Amino acid sequence: MLIHAHPDPDELGRVYAPDLAIPTGMRAFTEALAALEPVDGSRWAGWLRSARRNYLDFIKPTAMPGEVNLAEIVLYLGRTLPENAIMIHCAGNNSGWVHRFFQYRGYGSQIVATSGSMGYGVPAAIAAKLAHPERTVVSFNGDGCFMMLGQEIATALQYGVAPVIIVVNNTMLATIRMHQEQVFPGRVVGTDLYNPDFTALARAYGAHAETVKRTEEFAPALERSLAAGRLAVIEVMIDRNALTPTMTLPAAD
């Protein structure tokens, strides 16, 4: 049974057709649930164990071409970042690794773009760090996203705001390229990027900057970045054939 509770009646059933639609606020709904008699969940205990096993299998690292495995990097972040860290990610295929392998920690622990808005990651990281200077803020950005508003690291440095900005560099707009390969194979248009050296660019602004070309280089780069005392940029060079956690460029068509 699918139960949909929402304070706006117009939202009920907008995406999925529920078996029971309840127009209510979340506080009233949870208080009503808490007042119910305890439910015997033994009848779905087997299903619950199976679903848990499937989830744990789902967040195991997947293979990808090249010397950098983003799944392992994201899992490392999940293991080592403080419990109250804020993870931000921009639009693009790189966000698929974060969605899949960075486990949700609670309200306000992940901040993402709406409707695939590109360029969001750097300004959002600055705003999050300004709002919560005591919390670690990490921002995932594709190279295309970073090229849009990456210059805002100057604002962060000017005001002493110190998030960690990760730039996943595959020299292309991977999401659009993926759709081109799937729908119009052999007709690739306008998705290759001519990028600067992001590490050198960040240093020119005065940021701490690192380049990661192999998975094992990421952990010490992150440690140095967190200890730098100012905004840090970690440029992660990935194989352009790695489109998603489970899809390669040759397989896209």
Image (cartoon, helix red, strand yellow):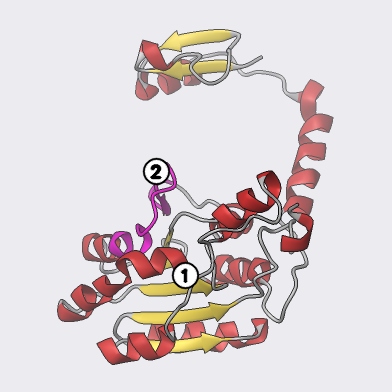
Q: Position of residue 188 (x, y in %)?
A: 61, 58
Q: Quadrant of the N terminus?
A: top right
* Residue at point 69%, 66% (across, down): 242
Which residue is outermost to the left?
159
Segment tinted magenta in the rendering: 107-125
Is 123 situated above or below 19? below
Q: Is residue 119 covered in magenta?
A: yes
* Percent coordinates x, y for residue 6 in the rendering: 41, 19
Instruction: Give the mark, 1 or 2, whose residue is nearer the N terminus.
Output: 2
Q: Residue at x 64, y 71 (%)?
A: 240
Left or right placement of residue 114 versus residue 67 in this view = left
Q: Which mark is residue 143?
A: 1
The x and y percentages for residue 156 are 22, 74
Disc 2 element: loop
> Toward which corner of the image does residue 132 lie, by quadrant?
bottom left
Q: Is there a contact, CB below 8 Å, between mark 1 and mark 2?
A: no
Nearest-to-viewer mark from 1 and 2: 1
Identify the residue at the far front of this view.
Answer: 187
Q: In this view of the protein, can residue 214 be seen by the observer?
A: yes
Q: Which residue is mark 2?
A: 114
Evaluate whether residue 137 shows in this view.
no
Circle 1 sits in a helix, a strand or a loop, which is it? helix
Q: CA distance from mark 1 to mark 2?
A: 18 Å
Residue 162 magenta: no
Graded by Cα atoms within 10 Å as few (under 14), some (14 to 19) or many (20 or more), the crowding at tag 2 reads: few
At 79% across and 44% down in the image, what residue appears?
54
Amino acid found under the numbered disc labelled 1: Asp
Toward the viewer: 230 or 180?
180
